[in-house]
Image (cartoon, helix red, strand yellow):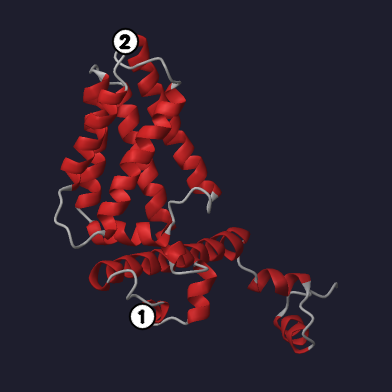
Amino acid sequence: MARNNSSPKAVRNALRRHEPSAEVGQLFRAPAGVRDGQVTGLRERKKARLRQQIIDTSIRLFRERGYENTRIDDIVEILEISQPTFFRYFPTKDAVLHDVGLRGFACAKERLEKELSRKASTAERLHERYQVLAKKVASDRPLWRAVVLSGVMDPVRSPEVRQAGEIAHKLLQELLLEGQKRGEITRALPADHLAEFLQALCNNIVRRWAVDLLRPHSLSERVRGAVDFFLRAVQP
């Protein structure tokens, strides 16, 4: 009678030789989905959770202590991780704010899309778009100060930021082009150029306001004045 290789004795002998038989391997091997998918999925979730914890802790410290007074040592000490672990996720302290900068561009895109779908004059659309921006920045000045000082929204430094900024620019250009077609905006210059001028004007005001902590100027008022100045300059 043929011998059954799956007998307890065969299993013990295979384990002693450290050469598992096919039957033994199947006895101790987890199903493929559990062995690969679940373990990999758990590992990725843990990495994503730690990455978000680094971002959240860093932002909290930037708000409480200021960007300049927050060190990587402070962040890793609170999280009880090593500096090498931190650097596996972010190459610098600045890089932690990268996602914040991208979210800023995403909000700008969303706002411009909403204005393009709204029946209103070009002046009303621009004022609404930039007032929403001003209120958002003013509601969290310490964080946006950190964003400005870190330079993470500089399109020269990041292809992702450059792409996000270009999308927002195209939507602003479309809004101004509609204004030209309605006769509300001069056609002496291309809408593309006008969008550049307006963005440069308002972005400069936001940056200066974010880091100028000694003056209690209202960002909303300064942005409103900038939009008014632009609209007067581009009258047909």
Label 2 packing within 10 angstroms: few (<14), some (14-19), many (20+): few
What's the amino acid at mark 2? Gly
Q: Position of residue 44 (x, y in %)?
A: 51, 63
Q: Position of residue 159 (x, y in %)?
A: 55, 48
Q: Are marks 1 and 2 in contact (CB under 8 Å)?
A: no
Q: Residue at x 40, y 27 (%)?
A: 194
Name the outermost residue toward the bottom: 16
The quadrant of the rendering that contains the N terminus is bottom right
Name the outermost residue toward the top: 182
Tag in front: 1 or 2: 2
Mark 1 and mark 2: Cα distance apart in space:
56 Å
What's the amino acid at mark 1? Asp
Residue 149 position (above or below residue 109): below
Q: Residue at x 24, y 18 (%)?
A: 121
Q: Position of residue 160 (x, y in %)?
A: 52, 47
Q: Residue at x 71, y 74 (%)?
A: 24
Quadrant of the rendered structure where residue 74 is? bottom left
Residue 50 position (above or below residue 18): above
Residue nearest the observer in this picture, 161 or 85? 161
- Determine which of the numbered discs, if any, sits on residue 39 in the image: none
| Whether residue 138 is visible | yes
Quadrant of the rendered structure where residue 20 is? bottom right
Q: Is residue 116 left or right of residue 135?
A: right
| Residue that carries the numbered disc 2 in the rendered image | 183
| Residue that carries the numbered disc 1 in the rendered image | 74
Label 1 packing within 10 angstroms: few (<14), some (14-19), many (20+): some
Q: Position of residue 80 (x, y in %)?
A: 39, 82
The quadrant of the rendering that contains the C terminus is top left
Q: Tag 2 or tag 1, which sits nearer the N-term?
A: 1
Residue nearest the observer in this picture, 164 or 22? 164
| Whether residue 109 is visible | no
Q: The residue tagged with tag 1: helix, strand or loop?
A: helix
